Image: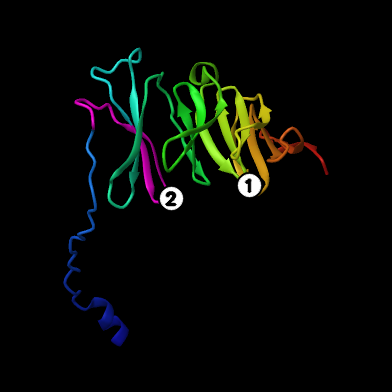
Amino acid sequence: VNSFTTVIQKPKLPFEWKICDSFKWRAGPRAQHSTGWSSLLVADGKFFYREEMEVPFTLETASSQFFARDAYNGRVLWSIEESKWHGGPRPIAFAKGKLFMPFNEKLVCMDANTGVLLFELIGSGLEKKWALNRLEIVDELVIAQGEVGFRAFSINDGKEQWKINAVSNWLRHQDKLITSNRGVIEARSVKDPTKSIWKVNQIGFKMIGSDK
């Protein structure tokens, strides 16, 4: 009876939610007309992002400004203008105080504290010829994915470590690179992806190759 009474007793008044005064800062657009923001990333106490700056906006004359702000108070630490942009994804990655990102049709590495260019990973024509759409840090590598495959570079000096010319999606599992390409799931070593560890045909999940 006591349990039944507890269940049907009149409920208490709803909890009173109070507004949390946690607002720190706000940054509006720098241009008269901004088409939006992209490449947002928070790392090492900083907030990085791009703002499209053109008025009016056209792909032929498109430009953007890349900002680094103090994540706590919103103060602009540095900014740099980008004059060449042909649309599409603008991924960025952070590791060891460095920013890896597409900039003026190149894949570059910048000092995250100052915005100074440290080195180039991929030369001119990046977005037209290779169509970069993903960047990810894996151990000491930055892996770049484009429409024609993958390329891995050292985060220390930007030298290319390996390349895979294949159109596929991928994910990392421990020390393996798992790719999916034309119905075949394949596991490769992150350090040496030219060697296949195993392959599985997605149709019927049939093992079609293994190094064991």
Q: Residue at image x 59%, y 22%?
A: 148
Image location of residue 91, percent across then percent down: 46, 33
Q: Residue at image x 31%, y 15%?
A: 58
- Residue 211 visible to an observer of this rendering: yes
- Asked whether 51 or 10 is in front, the reply is 51
Marks 1 and 2, how far apart in space? 25 Å
Q: What kind of residue is marked 2?
A: Asp
Q: Residue furthest top?
A: 60
Q: Residue furthest right?
A: 212
Q: What kind of residue is marked 1?
A: His
| Range shown magenta | 30-50
Q: Residue at image x 54%, y 16%?
A: 129
Answer with the quarter of the image where residue 115 lies: top left
Image location of residue 169, percent across then percent down: 58, 33
Quadrant placement of the C terminus = top right
Residue 210 drawn above or below residue 2? above
Mark 2 crowd level (few <14, some 14–19, many ≥20, 10 Å Cα): few
> In this figure, which residue is indicated by the disc labeled 1?
173
> In this figure, which residue is indicated by the disc labeled 2?
44
Answer with the quarter of the image where residue 208 lies: top right
| Element under disc 1 | strand
- Residue 1 visible to an observer of this rendering: no
Quadrant placement of the N terminus = bottom left
- Magenta stretch: residue 57 in it? no
